[in-house]
Amino acid sequence: MNKNFFSDMGIMLGRSMRHIFRSMDTIITVTIMPIAFMLLFVYVFGGAIQTGTDNYVNYLLPGILLIAIASGIAYTAYRLFMDMQSGIFERFHSMPIARSTVLWGHVLTSLVSNAISVVVIILVALIMGFRSPAGVLSWLAVAGILALFTLALTWIAAIAGLSATSVDGAGAFSYPLIFLPFISSAFVPTESMPAVVRAFADNQPVTSIVDAIRALLSDQPVGNNIWIALAWCVGIMLVAYIFAMRVYKKRV
């Protein structure tokens, strides 16, 4: 590893973060849709949905947070695609810096910007009546799961951003990821679903992640869900990282 790796990465992170703060509309756009979903489901559909709890926003919030993250990583793919088109990677590589830090700058920026979106959504949820008896350790566990989920999806976004041939193509991959929480336990218990749909919902990563976060926030036993959630996040992240680095070395 280049001895200046971390200082180089800090410079690349600062560059990417300046782009974010100069156009805060990206974070605002990412938070608007999940908040709209939360308002719609709590105040319009919530009364008709049976989840076994009187506080539907508590049940709903974990899925909303995952939708926000899935929306936010589309901007990572877009920014990577624009950097590819502008030739900035080649200019950076002509400098004495660790090559992978250019990519890591985008990844860490995604982590920070999505964390901001998550905090904003939780604040709105509190206004809507969300309450949690969870302690500090449970909240830290939730933050860790969300960070791993963000990194996993961000490395998928890196593959899309580096491989795409158009702006639309760079962001289109995120649509299935945004839709995935709807076929999970995020909005309704999977027991209410038809057998085939339930089989898919019970065995896809979002359900275990949502169930783990929901149990942590409600201070209930998490069981095996947290280990399944961590296995999904770490597994997806490692596979996506390997492929992203291969594409990066091939394209740049």
Image (cartoon, grey):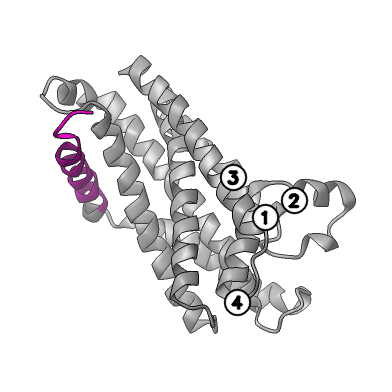
Q: Which residues are magenta?
A: 1-20
**Tag 2: Cα neighbours inside 10 Å, few (<14), some, or many (≥20)?**
many
**Coordinates of residue 183 in the picture (x, y in percent):** 71, 52
The disc placed on residue 154 is: none
Q: Earlier in the sequence, mark 4 or mark 1?
A: 1
Q: Earlier in the sequence, mark 3 or mark 1?
A: 1
The residue tagged 4 is 218
The residue tagged 1 is 207
Amino acid carrying label 4: it is Ser
Decide whether the magenta segment is chiefly helix, strand or loop.
helix
Q: Does residue 8 show up magenta in the picture? A: yes
Q: Earlier in the sequence, mark 3 or mark 4?
A: 4
The disc placed on residue 201 is: 2
Q: Does residue 90 show up magenta in the picture? A: no
Q: CA distance from mark 1 to mark 2?
A: 7 Å
Q: CA distance from mark 3 to mark 4?
A: 22 Å
Q: Secondary structure at mark 2?
A: helix
How many circles with numbers are drawn on the protein? Answer: 4
Amino acid carrying label 2: it is Ala
Q: Which residue is rendered at x = 43% and y = 54% of the image?
A: 147
Q: Secondary structure at mark 4?
A: loop
Mark 3 or 2, closer to the camera: 3
Q: CA distance from mark 3 to mark 1?
A: 11 Å
**Coordinates of residue 143 in the picture (x, y in percent):** 44, 62
Circles 1 and 2, Cβ within 8 Å, touching? The answer is: yes
Mark 2 or 4, closer to the camera: 4
